[in-house]
Image (spheres, helix red, strand yellow):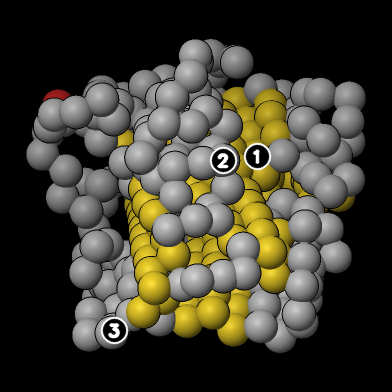
Amino acid sequence: MHISRFVPVVALSAVIVFQAGVASHWRGTGIASARTLLPVSDGNNWPDATNTGMPAGTVPTIYTGPNVITVAGTVIENKIINTYIEVRAKSVTIRNSRIDFDGWHPIYAHEGADGLTVERCTITGQGKTGGSYGIDTSDISGSTLIGNNIAGYENGITPGSNAVIKGNYIHDLQAGGADPHYDGIQLGGHPKVQANVLIENNTIIGRDNADVWITNDFGSINGIKVNHNQLLGKASGTGPNVSLPVFTVYIDGAKPNGTISGITITNNVIQRGVYGFIDIDSASNVTGSGNVDPFASPI
């Protein structure tokens, strides 16, 4: 990981463009935890425990299966689900439900199961499983993940291409095993090319690694929009998950598995991580504007 100086090459009208191949980051000054965080209010209700997950007033019933969904267009709603859901069909919807599962993937979509929607679900792990994801749609296209409350996994969400990730509350990440790698939203470049992902109006309270992690571990990435999110760490309190991210947003295209380009980071509230706000290495056409820290100071 590069601990280097922020190197903008163009700065016009509060838009910052980063030079391809130059390791850069927004370091900022001071440590955000030194003051009480006052999240910026812009008239929007940021996602939290009160407005995400299974809606209040839902009268759920126990889900009795199947675990593996093979019928296109299946709708699972208003359920208590104490197991995993493995999606192998197109256009499946899971909504207004609570999923309690301490394994690797409470919701996993296999290749070809395009068009999955997960909406207003509370997805809770027990912090026991290393490498776990609350929602894993990395092998499909066209997932819509809206208004979910995700906690207790190593990573919150990993999407595929043409995905919408909006209005989710990702927090209290926790996992067993050695050297967990905590990410709120993780993009690793698979399947082969990961493109056209909207990450908007989410609250992510990350730890140890990054709130938004974008790397070319498995292939190229392009067309990612990170807009109007609250990207924080848990800098005080009690428990094992009290930690700041290393960098709050981390972008690294240094691996030989493809390229990273066309990333926009706009209008976010970003708490400074241990080493800085945003780290960028070996990526092209990465732009940012309108981002502030939790005290409303531009970054």
Quadrant in the picture for residue 70: bottom right
Q: Is residue 219 above or below residue 86?
A: above
At which x and y percent is residue 165? 55, 64
At which x and y percent is residue 254? 78, 23
Element marked by disc 2: loop
Counting every numbered tag in the picture gives 3
At which x and y percent is residue 258? 88, 36
* Residue denoted by label 3: 58
- Does residue 212 appear anywhere in the picture? no
Residue type (three-letter) at the residue carrying disc 3: Thr
Category of crowding for the residue at label 1, using alpha-carbon neighbours closer than 10 angstroms: few (below 14), some (14–19), many (at least 20): many
Left or right of residue 235, residue 203 in this image: right
Quadrant in the picture for residue 7: top right
* Of callouts 2 and 3, the N-terminal one: 3
Residue type (three-letter) at the residue carrying disc 1: Ile
Quadrant in the picture for residue 203: bottom left
Q: Between 9 and 161, which is closer to the camera in this rendering?
A: 161
Category of crowding for the residue at label 2, using alpha-carbon neighbours closer than 10 angstroms: few (below 14), some (14–19), many (at least 20): many
Q: Residue at x 46, y 72 (%)?
A: 63
Q: Between 237 and 133, which is closer to the camera in this rendering?
A: 133
* Residue denoted by label 1: 214
Q: Are marks 2 and 3 in contact (CB under 8 Å)?
A: no
- Does residue 207 appear anywhere in the picture? yes
Q: Residue at x 40, y 45 (%)?
A: 125
Query: In the image, which disc is placed on residue 126?
Result: none
* Residue denoted by label 2: 104
Q: Residue at x 77, y 34 (%)?
A: 216
At which x and y percent is residue 136? 63, 52
* Of callouts 2 and 1, the N-terminal one: 2
> Which quarter of the image is occupied by the N terminus?
top right
